[in-house]
Image (cartoon, grey):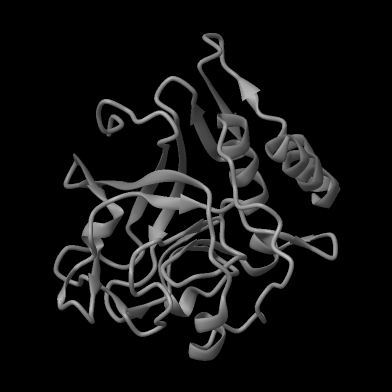
Amino acid sequence: MLVEAMFLSLLLACSAKDLPAAAGLPNESGESFTVGKITVDKRARTVRCPATVNMAEGVLEYLLVTDKGKTHESLLATSVSPYQLNIAMLLLGARPTPEIANLPPDQLTASTLKSAPELTGDNVDVFISWKDGGDSQQVRAEEWIDNLAAKAPMTAGPWTYTGSAIYQKRFLAQEEGSIVALVTDPAALVNNPRPGNRDDANWSAQKSKIPAFGTPVEIIFQLLSNPPTSQPAK
């Protein structure tokens, strides 16, 4: 019931221009379909969307935001609509965080992060693929991020699909452009469950591993409600 209610609420919150693309276009096999620029593969349990490298160094609060989001603190940026990305994940079967009563202010600070609500949802793996001299490359998203407190790379493992929130008939991920957060952000679609997620100065880009600014990449979300047997194809 939660997924159905969230899906209905999203449709009500969507503007008219988002609705046609939100419906999706099934292909002949019925195993995959598109939602705008997003590709959903039901068999692989993946959602794929295009993005670009937005920061190759510096402190980060987000892995992925929209072009109109908090790009000054995000590793990647995309033109994809968070409305459509969330609908794609719901159609795949993702179960987001239940309704949150008290949302933090728009600006995340050390104080608001400490009091931010605990977020739950389905586990998702996040991969990044790109072309390097014509060769296909793919890594887990964590491989491009450093944990400054631990003085080590970000721990490999799943992220939490929290699904953002609707507040005063506004879908917050769409309003704020927040898609994948490294610090706890109820407005984001995906959150980081690791220790350090309440510290806005804990995460940074691994400069030596990240392609140049503006490099096109593809983000792959793999739903882990039923764990896959292998990584998605590049």
**Residue 67, percent across and down?**
55, 65
81 vs 140, left or right, is: right
Above or below, 207 relative to 45: below
Q: Is residue 208 above or below residue 222?
A: below
* Residue 72 sits above or below residue 51 on the image: below
Q: Position of residue 42 (x, y in %)?
A: 49, 23
- Residue most extreme to the top: 29
Answer left or right for 62 relative to 173: left
Residue 61 in which image quadrant: bottom left
Q: Is residue 211 visible?
A: no
Taking depth in this image into account, of 209 and 100 the one nearest to the observer is 100
Q: Nearer the viewer, residue 115 or 178?
A: 115
Q: Quadrant of the C terminus?
A: top left
- Classify residue 104 as left or right of residue 40: right
Residue 92 visible here: yes
Query: Looking at the image, which residue is at 39% across and 82% down?
Result: 199
Residue 15 position in % (x across, y down): 83, 51
Q: Where is residue 189 drawn, in percent x and y?
A: 56, 55
| Quadrant in the rendering for residue 224 | top left
Residue 52: name its quadrant. bottom left
Looking at the picture, tell me which residue is in the foreground, 162 or 79. Answer: 162
